[in-house]
Amino acid sequence: MDGDNAEGRERAHELIRAGRLLYGRGWVPATSGNFSARLSDGRIAITVSGRHKGELEEADIMVVDPEGRATQADLRPSAETLLHTGLYKRFPDVGAVLHPHSLHATLISRLFPAGVELAGYELLKAFSGITTHDTRLVVPVFPNDQDMRRLADQVDAYLDEHEPVSGYLIAGHGLYVWGTTVSEALRHAEAFDFLFECELRMQGLEKR
């Protein structure tokens, strides 16, 4: 991270704290996951590819332009950078994107490939814009794909045709979640994971 950029360093430290929190919950095992935050000039602070998210330092956060191109030639951003930039382009108010690999998200993405319906839960109010438990929220699930452009296009096509959501799943992979700030994205991630666990327990697929 550019040490002369105070805003960039602040966003980097927010992502570092997020990494430690998510790793502590067991949601980013090994070197899985990737995180980003938008800077006021439109560039994006994002985790460097292959770094352990529970041990992030400033040097593990780099900057890419709005198209996902690295501004530091010696560093390589996450392979999934296009999934981040696509969300920033679509949602001008989004300031952070988190991609954890929690057990609950991974399991439910395999068990419900057509999407996960969440309804009637009080915790749905943890998501921005939802004010009542009497809500039906469908979390889409996309097939895993090593072609990030193709996957990003599938996400875009879905979001073009459906109500706004705060996250989506990639089958056998994990959750993408976003918010206006890193803190809001973390809140959404926690809410999703709790609700996914509820659904798994209701299906008798999670040990009590």
Image (cartoon, rainbow, N blue to C red):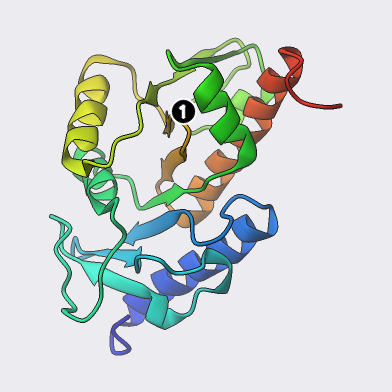
Taking the spot 44% from the left edge, 69% from the top edge, the residue there is 51
The residue at which mark 1 appears reads as 129
Q: Nearer the viewer, residue 180 or 116?
A: 116
Taking the spot 29% from the left edge, 48% from the top edge, the residue there is 84
Taking the spot 61% from the left edge, 65% from the top edge, the residue there is 20
Query: In the image, residue 128 lies at what x, y percent?
Result: 48, 33
Mark 1 residue type: Gly
Q: Quadrant of the C terminus?
A: top right
Q: Nearer the viewer, residue 22 or 5?
A: 22
Q: Classify 202 as above or below 62.
A: above
- Which residue, as the protein is rendered here, is positioned at the far front? 146
Query: In the image, residue 144 lies at what x, y percent?
Result: 35, 33
Taking the spot 48% from the left edge, 73% from the top edge, the residue there is 13
Q: Classify 42 as above or below 85.
A: below
Query: In the image, residue 95 lies at what x, y percent?
Result: 35, 52
Quarter location, residue 41: bottom left
Left or right position of 208 against 146 = right
Instruction: State whether residue 39 appears in this view.
Output: no
Q: Classify 132 as above or below 178.
A: above
Q: Quadrant of the N terminus?
A: bottom left
Query: In the image, residue 56 lies at what x, y percent?
Result: 50, 74
Element type at mark 1: loop
Instruction: State whether residue 141 appears in this view.
Output: yes
Left or right position of 50 against 193 = left
| Neighbourhood count class around disc 1 (C-alpha, 10 Å): few under 14, some 14–19, many 20 upward | few
Quarter location, residue 40: bottom left
